[in-house]
Amino acid sequence: MKVGILGSGDVAKSLAAGFVKHGHEVALGTRDTAKLKDFVAQHKGAQAGSFADAAKFGEVVVLAVKGTVALDALSAAGAANLTGKTVIDATNPIADAPPTNGVLKFFTSLDQSLMERLQSALPSAHFVKAFNSVGNAAMVNPQFKGGKPTMFICGNNDAAKAKVRGICDQFGWETADMGKAEAARAIEPLCMLWCIPGFLSNDWFHAFKLLQKD
Ligand SMILES: NC(=O)c1ccc[n+]([C@@H]2O[C@H](COP(=O)([O-])OP(=O)(O)OC[C@H]3O[C@@H](n4cnc5c(N)ncnc54)[C@H](OP(=O)(O)O)[C@@H]3O)[C@@H](O)[C@H]2O)c1
């Protein structure tokens, strides 16, 4: 599969490394390709270009930029380059204000998630929320004593969610589909919960698991 990744930060690089490890081709998008020079040199199957280059390249596109600039990055990627494509939305709407007692501040409300804003701005792309509520170090084939962690996903397009489920299978996750885009109102704040042990106890390696009856 050809995967475009919008971003040059820890999430973009962790997911890009995961995709190439599993035999996919990756193009990362950034405003400054110099940031990715070492990464590309160390990862066969990865290349770097502009946001638009990455969006054009990917059959599937990952959005992995700072939440406050997600719309800017998508606009630089170009709506036409994302039309009909699955866009994995790993972003969180974290505000610039500092956390209070380890609890992050969001710039969204519980009645409208960031992913819903993005989906409304680009109605022809198929957004799927995923990878937002786990640290980048545990995104790809993490090993936990309690077994496979759960990736909570949501989005309006079933075929796009099926693609993301396949990626989660490959990356060692079980997937829990929470329904349509509105479910991102619940999934995005999982990031706040996930970060609390980090801010309070410097514990940054954990993940959520949904326990089922059987
Ligand atoms: N860090 C984690 O472990 C983690 C885990 C789960 C979810 N997330 C979420 O994933 C996203 C990425 O996180 P991150 O820690 O990898 O990186 P980050 O520092 O939040 O974001 C870095 C990216 O944002 C882009 N960016 C910054 N300002 C921009 C602007 N004005 N216009 C366009 N792009 C701009 C940068 O583009 P350039 O390449 O051009 O500089 C870079 O690619 C965030 O939304 C975060 O909340 C993070």
Image (tube, rainbow, N blue to C red):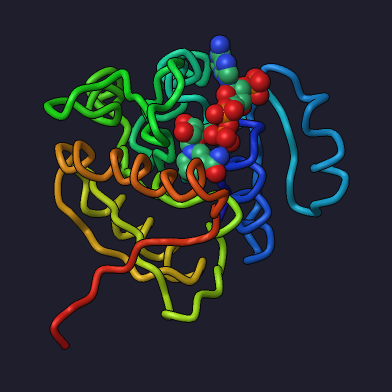
Q: Quadrant of residue 8?
A: top right
Viewer-nearest residue: 177 or 187: 187
Q: Say whether residue 58 is visible.
A: no
Q: Is 130 left or right of 62, judged from the image as shown?
A: left
Q: Say whether residue 73 is visible.
A: yes
Vertical placement of residue 206 versus 211, above or below: above
Residue at image position (61%, 55%) is: 137
Point out the image quarter for the N terminus. bottom right
Q: Position of residue 138 (x, y in %)?
A: 55, 59
Q: Position of residue 97 (x, y in %)?
A: 43, 16
Label count reads 0
Viewer-nearest residue: 61 or 172: 172
Q: Position of residue 66 (x, y in %)?
A: 50, 25
Vertical placement of residue 189 versus 75, above or below: below
Q: Is 32 left or right of 10, judged from the image as shown?
A: right
Viewer-nearest residue: 68 or 104: 104
Viewer-nearest residue: 181 or 193: 193
Point out the image quarter for the C terminus. bottom left
Residue at image position (33%, 36%) is: 84
Q: Position of residue 150 (x, y in %)?
A: 34, 65
Vertical placement of residue 182 versus 166, above or below: above
Q: Is 44 left or right of 144, judged from the image as shown?
A: right
Residue extending farthest bottom: 214
Q: Is 26 left or right of 85, judged from the image as shown?
A: right
Residue at image position (23%, 29%) is: 113
Q: Quadrant of residue 117?
A: top left
Residue at image position (41%, 44%) is: 196
User: Ligand 1 quadrant?
Assistant: top right
